Image (cartoon, rainbow, N blue to C red):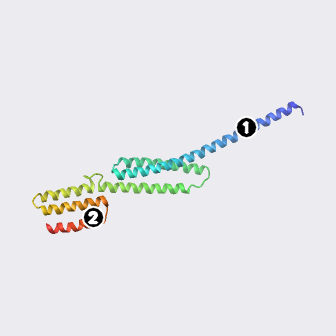
């Protein structure tokens, strides 16, 4: 065999090896990009769940419905990311039971948070609406009926208001008991 033929065969082998290495490198980069996408999705889910908690706490602190809207937008985003993650796992033939479980937990969380918001709407988002507003209006009606004539009844009624506010602020049953005792005294006074 001539040197020329040996050099040509060596060159052909090197070209085939380089093409094989290029295909292997391309496959590795594609696989790595999929793994990076999965890691990015997991990170997004973690930060989005924290944002959901922040929206929940902001709603509870401020009683503002804009936090409900933010919560609902963020939970839709989390569900989409979970769906993408589940597709990535299915593509790689990896079990995704934790993802399905997390999706169920988020659906329950969404349902419970929306129920909480509805209950708060019923109670009242502000002092003048909902049950708070009705209670306030009723007490103002009683104050008008009592007027400034009977200071003992007015004092008993104001004591009831004090017990009511203490209970609402502290959620301690001792104020409910005090309210009930003072209500009995108020009823006996009338």
Residue depicted at x 23% and y 60%: 162
> Residue 34, position in %: x, y?
60, 45
Task: Answer with left or right where residue 16 lies relative to residue 164.
Answer: right
Depth check, front residue: 18 or 146: 146
The earlier-in-sequence mark between 2 and 1 is 1
Q: Which mark is residue 117?
A: none
SS class, disc 2: helix
Q: Which residue is mark 1?
A: 19
Q: Quadrant of residue 15?
A: top right
The part of the image, by quadrant, that contains residue 96 is: bottom right
Image quarter hosting the C terminus: bottom left
- Could you tell me which residue is drawn at 29 percent across and 54 percent down? 124
Q: Residue furthest top?
A: 4
From the viewer's side, name the closer residue of 174 and 134: 174
Say few, some or many: other residues with alpha carbon within 10 Å of mark 1 (under 14 / 14 to 19 / 20 or more): few
Residue at the image position 11 percent from the left and 57 percent from the top: 148
Q: Compare residues 124 and 182 and report the one nearer the observer.
A: 182
**Mark 2–mark 1 distance (CA, rounded to whole Å):** 81 Å
Image disc number at residue 175 = 2
Compared with residue 13, is residue 122 higher up or lower down, i.e. above or below? below
């Amino acid at each position: 065999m001539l040197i020329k033929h040996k050099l040509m065969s060596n060159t052909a082998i090197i070209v085939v090896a380089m093409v094989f290495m290029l295909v292997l490198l391309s496959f590795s980069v594609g696989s790595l990009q999929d793994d990076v996408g999965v890691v990015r999705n997991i990170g997004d889910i973690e930060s989005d769940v924290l944002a959901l908690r922040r929206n929940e706490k902001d709603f509870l602190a401020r009683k503002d419905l804009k936090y409900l809207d933010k919560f609902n937008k963020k939970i839709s985003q989390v569900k989409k990311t979970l769906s993408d993650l589940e597709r990535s796992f299915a593509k790689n033939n990896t079990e995704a039971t934790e993802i399905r479980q997390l999706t169920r937990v988020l659906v329950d969380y969404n349902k419970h948070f929306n129920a909480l918001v509805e209950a708060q709407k019923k109670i009242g988002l502000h002092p003048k609406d909902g049950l708070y507003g009705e209670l306030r209006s009723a007490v103002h009606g009683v104050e008008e009926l009592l007027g400034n004539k009977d200071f003992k009844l007015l004092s008993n009624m104001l004591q009831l208001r004090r017990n009511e506010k203490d209970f609402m602020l502290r959620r301690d049953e001792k104020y409910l008991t005090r309210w009930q005792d003072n209500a009995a005294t108020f009823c006996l006074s009338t």
